[in-house]
Image (spheres, grey):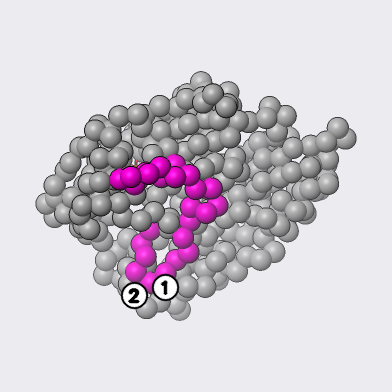
Amino acid sequence: MKAFQFVRPRSSTEAAQGLADSADARVHSGGCDLLDRMKERIEEPAVLVSLCDAEGLGDVRIEEDGSIWIGARVTLAQLAESDVVRRFLPTLGEAAGLAASPQLRHRATIAGNLAQHTRCGYYRVKSFPCLKRGGDSCPVRADGGVQDTAGIFGNAACASAHPSSLAPVLGSLDAEIAIRDAKTLRFVAFADFWAAPAKGRASDTILKSGEVIEAVRLPARDAKQHVGFAEIRQKKAFDWALVSCAVRYETDAEGRVTQARAWLGSVAPAPYRATKAEAALVGKAVTDEVAVKVGDAALADATPLAGTTYKVQLAKVALKRALAAAREKA
Ligand SMILES: Cc1cc2nc3c(=O)[nH]c(=O)nc-3n(C[C@H](O)[C@H](O)[C@H](O)COP(=O)(O)OP(=O)(O)OC[C@H]3O[C@@H](n4cnc5c(N)ncnc54)[C@H](O)[C@@H]3O)c2cc1C
């Protein structure tokens, strides 16, 4: 690995300033993803601005208006164990507790989890051309390309899949991302946090250099809302989900859905909001038959490659399971 300078600012503002001062600096939280990329030499920053000593980033707290504030440095293990998360955001605790492995969950942070880069094998190996690393096209899509973990939506230019299994949960809960630069703190709706793949753009987020995620904010949860999470993996640990799904809905007195959110993970270059699933849910009571129709609606626009047709069925199953879980959890 190329030598680099490691700086430990005491606040997120100082960190943002440190990033703004050097074009060749990167934010470091748990390092689970960033250090992998550096060891693979697909990134060789001169400076790592670590958040490990920055104050005020390590808490989960309930704000006066009932919203929940999760500091950028909160680890997946902390999320899984937090009483606040278990009580108010059970699907988030569940997703965090299932991710990766115990060792990784104790290092990996919520901010790094959202800003992690794709695990696409072509992106991760420097000797392959890759659109995200400045190449002209996506080798996954080429004849003979290895496609098994690729995306099935939005894959015309780049068939990568965003690997976060927390992301669909945060989408379903209408999270906002608090972003700090050297002068201001702004809030971005979860759906607006993602950037489409482009030549030479490795990151999947809208973050600019000189910006850090300070926290994830979740609106106060109405106890009547149904929430559910499901994911499908090849291995139970030390692996990424093939597909993950989170749903949230409210019902009227007759049990019919009045408002719904459905998000899928690992199916597109960014977390994917399944708006057709949401539309198919509204006005219906959630039964197994309805769940099948919702799955068909959600995947109607999928554009799988030859190697990813199986993901269409997997996503339908994940959606059905998430809806079944949500029926139980009001
Ligand atoms: C074997 C294995 C299995 C895994 N399984 C899963 C899984 O099942 N589900 C899942 O969701 N993930 C999984 N992961 C991914 C893992 O959860 C992420 O790598 C981890 O969450 C990244 O967090 P981090 O704090 O270590 O980030 P870092 O490595 O520190 O950073 C990751 C990226 O985010 C940027 N970044 C970090 N913090 C900030 C910030 N505050 N503001 C702006 N940018 C920031 C960094 O610059 C970097 O680009 C797995 C990883 C491995 C190795």
Q: Can residue 50 be seen in this view?
A: yes
Alpha-carbon neighbours of circle 1 within 10 Å: few (<14), some, or many (≥20)?
Answer: many
Element under disc 2? loop
The residue drawn where x is 59% and y is 61% is: 310
Residue type of the residue flagged with mark 2: Gly
Residue 200 figure quarter: bottom left
Q: Which residue reaches farthest top?
A: 83
Q: Which residue reaches farthest right?
A: 254
Q: Position of residue 103 (x, y in %)?
A: 34, 34
Q: Name the residue under label 1.
A: 138
Q: Is residue 75 visible?
A: no
The residue drawn where x is 52% and y is 30% is: 68
Q: Position of residue 160 (x, y in %)?
A: 45, 63
Residue 330 figure quarter: top right
Answer whether residue 45 is magenta in the image: no
Q: Position of residue 207 (x, y in %)?
A: 39, 54
Q: From which residue to which does the magenta span run?
A: 178-203
> From the viewer's perspective, is residue 315 above or below residue 52?
below
Q: In this view, does 244 lie to the left or right of 121?
A: right
Marks 2/1 in contact by CB < 8 Å: the verdict is: yes
Answer whether residue 183 is magenta in the image: yes
Ligand 1 within 8 A of label 1's CB?
A: no
Residue type of the residue flagged with mark 1: Cys
